[in-house]
Image (cartoon, helix red, strand yellow):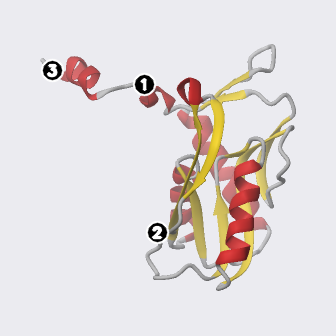
Amino acid sequence: MLTEDGKHLYVSYDEYHNLIEKLAIRIHQSSWEFDTILCLARGGMRPGDILSRIFDKPLAIMSTSSYRADSGMVQGNLDIARFITTPRGEIAGKVLLVDDLADTGHTLNAVIQLLRNNYKPISELRSAVIWTKGMSSFQADYSVELLPTNPWIHQPFESYDSLRPEQLMAKWTV
């Protein structure tokens, strides 16, 4: 649900999963055959996992991080992992790069540059995101929603960002 001022988008679990399914349909309708899904952790892990299951393709993971300040709401320096975790040795062939959103586009542009320069066995690379913000300098090959007002997206699992084990203990201790 987008707030009236267009500054916040609140997404339920059902909406989130429906959007991933719509993303899968867009990818499928393109008739592009790929070998591996490479998700960017953390935001791309859930969509990557679901797409990996739907398309029955191996899931590789590359960790990136840029949102740290102000409870993860302010973009900081971009860190990209030096290694990709993949069940098939080295990532190669046709790769679908998956993240949850193209916010500024900085992360996706940097990752694609890194992959093209350092991972020569990748023969073709396409990208998929759920959301693309209007301010993004990156346009994914596959995207479900364009958000021209650039809202902050409140995903259904973000309550875990501030939940600590002690709070769970208090909640679940009889």
Amino acid of disc 2: Thr
Check the image and report above or below for 98 versus 167.
below
Q: Amino acid at mark 3?
A: Thr
Q: Residue at x 64, y 37 (%)?
A: 76
In this figure, which residue is indicated by the disc labeled 3? Answer: 173
Res. 51 image quadrant: bottom right
Quarter residue 125 falls in: bottom right
Q: Residue at x 66, y 64 (%)?
A: 97
Which residue shows up at 85% across the image and 28% down it? 149
Q: CA distance from mark 2 to mark 1?
A: 27 Å
Please tell me the numbered disc located at residue 85: 2
Residue bearing the label numbered 1: 162
Residue 164: name its quadrant.
Answer: top left
Residue 172 point in image, percent of width and height: 20, 22
* Residue type, label 1: Ser
Q: Which x, y percent locates residue 10?
A: 64, 25
Relative depth, front residue between 23 and 154:
154
First reached walking from the N terminus: tag 1 or tag 3: 1
Q: Nearer the viewer, mark 1 or mark 3?
A: 1
Q: Whole-Å distance between the Cαs marked 1 and 3? A: 19 Å
Quadrant where the image shows the N terminus: top right
Label 3 vs 2, first from the N-terminus: 2
User: Does 18 sit above or below residue 58?
Assistant: above
Q: Residue furthest front?
A: 77
